[in-house]
Amino acid sequence: MALAQAAPDAAAAEAAAAAEPPASAKVAQDAVKKVEDIILRISREVWENPELSLHEEISSEIHIRELKAAGFAITSTGTSGIPTAFVAEWSQGEGGPKIGFLPEYDALPGLGNAAEPRQTPGPKGVEVGHGCGHNMLGAGCTGAAIALKEMMIADGTPGTLRVYGCAAEETEGAKVYMARDGLFNDLDACLAWHPAPANGTGLLRTAAIDMINVHFRGRTAHAGVDPWEGRSALKAAELFGAGIQFMREHVRPTTRLHYVYTSAGETPNVIPDNAGIFIMIRDADRDQVRAVSDWVREVAQGAATMTRTEAELDLFFGLHDLLPNTPLVQTLHRHISATPIEWTEEEQEFARTCQKEMGLPPAGILDSVLPILPEITMGGGTDVGDVSYNTPVGLFAIATMPVGVGLHTWPVTACGGMTIGDKSSLYSAMVMAGVGHDLLTDKDLRDRVRADFEKRLGDKTFISALPPDKLRPSGIPPHLLLRDGSGELVEEIVEYEAGEVDGQSATT
């Protein structure tokens, strides 16, 4: 809200909001109402079966089941080496534009909660819950594609709709692997949304990210008898952490450096010969992240030199910043403004009770629409960024949680399992179905969207931040590895039996 109030182009934003509602908005609202049961079924079933990243067996199958029933062909499962990712497609007529949708469906640890305005264990206890609202996000995206299909059939619009099952957004997002495989390159545009405390959109840019595991190797010795014989990996890790702190004065305001120690020895009377740190590096774009990552690498080597240990760095995952698109943002804003959302007094009381439990002012949940937000880089990142470097992306937010409540908290889970979450899923689907129809039927809009995309991209060439030999995310459950879509069953079985899967020991 503060960003909106400070927007330098507030007059332009107000003018866009005051524009005539798009003709497709009412048609989209009616189309979504016809498939309302499908959307709510997806959201509620995924909420009732929360699954962590890369474990979304039930959640992905819920989306696949509903898409199949709606006439979509499942063109890929185990997409880009990720067992719980998929691609579904539906086409009509010859040629025509291609529009993509990006449902997510992974949950978070420790955020299980009942649909109650207080901390109460949910259907699966407290271990896992949709504290980022991906049950709603996924239902809105998949539901929008199904509703848009019905709109296209009604008026004979040619084109292709493609739904990407985007597993593991919270960890090593499938979109990054899909983008590396070129799966978004032929789209005219891609649409997505995210749960938030407000309704709106803008020219916001998310951060680019590198994720690095730093591992120090030393030599053990008796810490009391002959410590001079040892070489402490722990001391190297501590010096590395100190080096990161000394970097902070000299990095850009957009740079973020945060880390945890993943291993640091077992007992004080043995010089630790192994220590590890997991560090995340964020910045405004890939070039700046790459520069900071190179500096981090030098700090690690310096710590190893000081302690006569060895440093190994594994940049195992990275993603791009988000490229906004002005014509898409303006079109989204018109549809958000034309699609009113109304909360009942019971829903407002639910929100106020959540706020009281969180120690926040009981302001309820917003129903108004923010003006278009200005271009600014945020500290958070999303794997939608990689998509935005391959095709124009329209991204927006819908109020799904009380004012002042942040993502990754229990009230988000609670609201997602009751009528607040239901309305947000439907509202988001209406916006995307309407904008999708505009893109399919308005060549001038498509041309303007493409021109803005090419201008922002400039002479940059998309190069995935993933290491070339990183075929799949780490941490895929062993029983799902054979569902990676490669068909190389023998190779997978041999790797698993040999204990070579993701560098961890395994038995059969």
Image: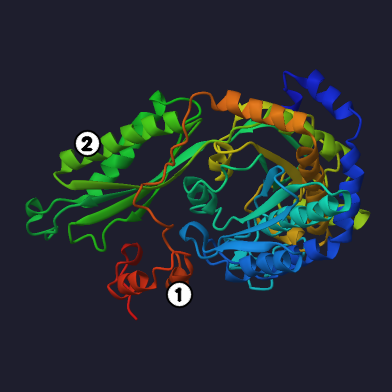
> At x 65% / y 30%, what residue is drawn?
450
The image quarter in which residue 258 lies:
top left
Question: Seen in the image, is 298 located left or right of residue 457?
Answer: left
> Marks 1 and 2, Cα distance to the nearest angstrom?
41 Å
The N terminus - image quarter:
top right
Q: Can you give x and y, in whole percent of width and height, for residue 125 in the image?
A: 63, 72
- Say the numbered circle drawn on residue 433: none
Q: Residue at x 64, y 32 (%)?
A: 324
Q: Which mark is residue 479?
A: 1
Q: Which residue is mark 2?
A: 302
Mark 1 vs 2, N-terminal side: 2
Q: Amino acid at mark 2?
A: Gly
Indicate the secondary structure of the residue bearing disc 2: helix
Discs 1/2, front: 1
Q: Does residue 432 appear in this view?
A: yes
Does residue 176 lie above or below 16 as drawn? below
Which quadrant holds residue 38? Answer: bottom right
- How packed is label 1: few (under 14 Cα within 10 Å), some, or many (20 or more)? few
Residue at 72 percent across and 57 percent down: it is: 142
Q: What x and y, as percent, mark residue 408?
A: 62, 53
Image spot of residue 387 (x, y percent): 57, 42
Residue 508 against residue 423 in the figure, above or below: below
Q: How is the image coloured?
A: rainbow
Kind of element beneath mark 1: helix
